[in-house]
Image: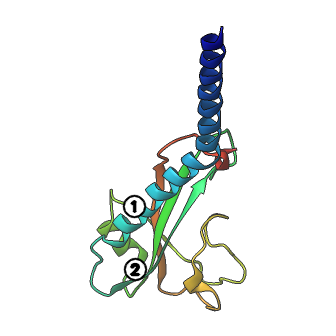
Amino acid sequence: MKTRKKSLKVVGRGVGLTLLLGLCYLLFGGALANDFRARQIERELAQLELPAGTELVETTSFVGNTTGTGNHVEIWAGILVYSTLSEEELKSHFAGRADVSAVPQDLAAYLPYDKAFIDFHALEGVAKGDGYFVIGGYFEAFTQADLRGF
């Protein structure tokens, strides 16, 4: 009888620990894994070969539900560059590797540039978007077990 109580205690603690670990993963593990993946993508984008006359200004990423529809998590990552080249020249240089979009002329009238989740600190206080371009795109998240997808 004593061994049975002891066995039930061990099994109960095991189930409790499993539930606690599962809850911790749901709350924190998925978010940490997705953040790690987003930082990897940022590093990869920052290492892209830039054409002459173009310089890297800043990198950023966003993890969450970027479309607002459905329960899913995705990553948007991009780099902000300053270039003397035109948007068409940059698009041809990065064709098939990343999307290129020009930062709008009037930053005060159209913030935050493209989507609500794009935030480049280097553009704070800048009056015009002349010569600035965003190069990036959408990527699959490491896991959908991330509460930011709701």
Q: Nearer the viewer, residue 29 or 57?
A: 29
Q: Secondary structure at mark 1?
A: helix
The Cα–Cα distance between marks 1 and 2, rounded to whole angstroms, is 28 Å
Q: Residue furthest front?
A: 2
Q: Secondary structure at mark 2?
A: loop
Measuring from the top left, give residue 15's x and y in whole percent.
Answer: 62, 25
The amino acid sitting under disc 1 is Gln
Per the rendering, the mark at residue 51 is: none
Residue 4 falls left or right of residue 90: right
Residue 13 falls left or right of residue 57: right
Decide: is 132 above or below 97. below
Measuring from the top left, give residue 72's x and y in whole percent.
Answer: 61, 41
Per the rendering, the mark at residue 86 is: 2
- Quarter of the view holding residue 85: bottom left
Residue at image point 66% right, 39% down = 71
Quadrant into which the C terminus falls: top right
Decide: is 11 above or below 130. above
Quadrant into which the N terminus falls: top right
Counting residues from the N terminus, which is met first, the one under dot 1 or under dot 2? Answer: 1
Residue 84 falls left or right of residue 142: left
How packed mark 2 is, by other alpha carbons closer than 10 Å (few <14, some 14-19, many 20 or more), is few
Decide: is 51 above or below 10. below
- Quarter of the view holding residue 42: bottom left
Measuring from the top left, give residue 102's x and y in whole percent.
Answer: 51, 75
Q: Nearer the viewer, residue 76 or 86?
A: 76
* Of marks 1 and 2, the one in the foreground: 1
The amino acid sitting under disc 2 is Ser
Residue wearing tag 1: 40
Residue at image point 59% right, 78% down = 104
Q: Residue furthest top?
A: 1
Residue at image point 63% right, 64% down = 117
Q: Nearer the viewer, residue 147 or 19?
A: 19
